[in-house]
Image: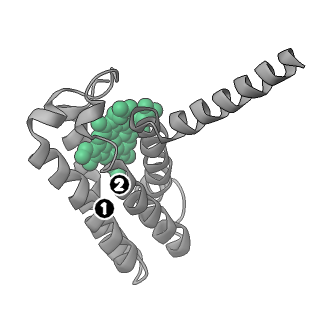
Amino acid sequence: MRRMLALAAFSALALSAGAVLAQDPISAREPTMKNIGRAFGAINRMNRGQDSFDAAKATEAFHTISANAKTFSTLFPDSAKTGDKNARPEIWTQKTDFDARVKKLAADAEAAATATAKGEADFKTSFAAVQPQCGGCHQVYRNE
Ligand code: HEC
């Protein structure tokens, strides 16, 4: 009986540890950016003509980028400055610039989703506006 109680207490502890982990901003960064990367891959192929243009899929991809950029912007609190080898300390020393870049990506991807519904030419124009933001931010704030 004592052992069972101890076991129950242990599982409750493990469960709450799991819940804390799921909310840990550091471990949420990679999957959030991966969602952006996957969505970007799909529209990148359409932009290059490797896949044919599909307005619905491209619109969805831009929505995914925007939504995940909004999430990403919440994952860099002062309490999570260390312990992530991919995030450079400049994120916090130049927080205004970093935040502005994430916000711009979310806004431009949202605008791109709307523009894409008008057709391929508008898709390409909006893609060209979003694409340089990825590498632009990575160069300054991300360790490869
Ligand atoms: C405002 C800055 C910023 C912008 C804009 C940005 N990223 Fe990132 N990205 C980061 C940071 C920081 C990391 C490292 C995250 C981490 O793991 O801590 C990252 C990581 C990644 C990763 C690696 C995820 C992994 O597997 O570890 C991919 C893929 C990625 N970004 C794709 C993109 C694409 C595609 C775009 C443009 C649509 C983009 N990013 C725009 C900051 C940015």
Residue projecting furthest to the top? 3
Nearest to N terminus: mark 2 or mark 1? 2
Quadrant hosting residue 26: top left
Relative vertical location of residue 137 with respect to residue 44 in this rendering, above or below: above
Say whether residue 57 is left or right of residue 84. right
Instruction: Tell me whether circle 2 and circle 1 mark residues in contact (CB < 8 Å).
Output: yes
Tell me residue 71's x, y (percent): 39, 53
Q: Nearer the viewer, residue 8 or 117?
A: 8
Mark 1 = which residue? 106
Quadrant where the N terminus lies? top right
Ligand 1 is within 8 Å of the C-beta of the residue at disc 2: yes
Relative vertical location of residue 53 with respect to residue 28 in this rendering, above or below: below
Which residue sits at x=35%, y=54%?
69
Say whether residue 66 is left or right of residue 31. left
Q: Is residue 134 visible?
A: no
Name which residue type carries label 1.
Ala
Residue projecting furthest to the right? 1
